[in-house]
Image: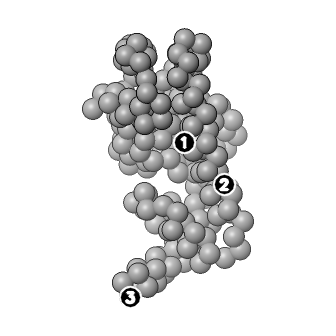
Amino acid sequence: MKFYPIFNFFNALEPVSDELIEQVRKHATAITVCKNTRLHPDGSSEKNALFIASGTLRKYTIIDKKQITLSLYGENELIGFTEISQYLDDEGLEAICDSELILLPKDFVEDLYINFPEVEKMVRKIFSLKYQKSVLESRLCRLPSAIHRYSVFSKATDRYNLPARILASYLLMREETFSRLKTKHKKESCL
């Protein structure tokens, strides 16, 4: 596995030079994290951008001793160190399942901007993807009913095969409501 997933991701955004690939091999670190590993605070995410080669991560907060999922990150997604550094004291980042991550140190990423013109083009495209994701998340939290949130979420993505408790908290509903809507949606899809 090593670094092929991130090279494929970069090349899908913008063709990259062999020199950039060599720099990534030299400075990046590939790690495997187990399910429920905390990456922030006090974890691997400190001063690193994270590329998810496989697995799923979630950003969460704790309110009244209950974990609320704020965002989900899946395969072939890049989480910038600026995103992580903006977390509040009561927010965390954890692996939902066993995951393979590629860590890109902050200083290294900043050097890439200076030395490789293609990086600026890639970053603009990454920001566009992140903007689309934040629009979806904003839309989900504004919808007034659980059925509307589930409907929008299920149409927008089928990428997350996660425990019901996590998806329910992400969609701002109880697990029972999530399970009922999921069953209803499956029945309607079969018809």
State the image quarter where residue 102 is shown.
top left
Mark nearer the viewer, 3 or 1 = 3
State the image quarter where residue 24 is shown.
top left
Q: Quadrant of the N terminus?
A: top left
Q: Amino acid at mark 3?
A: Leu
What is the spatial separation of the Cα atoms under label 2 and label 1, in whole angstroms? 21 Å
Total marks shown come to 3
- Label 3: how many Cα within 10 Å (few below 14, some 14–19, many 20+): few
Q: Amino acid at mark 1?
A: Leu
User: Reading the chain from its start, which is encountered first: label 3 or label 2?
Assistant: 2
Q: Which mark is residue 135?
A: 2
State the image quarter where residue 187 is shown.
bottom left
Q: According to the image, label 1 marks what residue?
A: 93
Which of 71 and 3 lies nearest the eye of the viewer? Answer: 3
- Label 1: how many Cα within 10 Å (few below 14, some 14–19, many 20+): many
What is the spatial separation of the Cα atoms under label 3 and label 2, in whole angstroms? 31 Å
Q: Position of residue 151 (x, y in %)?
A: 55, 73
Q: Residue at x 38, y 46 (%)?
A: 55
Q: Residue at x 62, y 58 (%)?
A: 136
User: Reading the chain from its start, which is encountered first: label 2 or label 1?
Assistant: 1
**In the rendered view, would you say 62 is above or below 113?**
below
Q: Is residue 112 left or right of residue 188?
A: right
Which of 54 and 36 lies nearest the eye of the viewer? Answer: 54
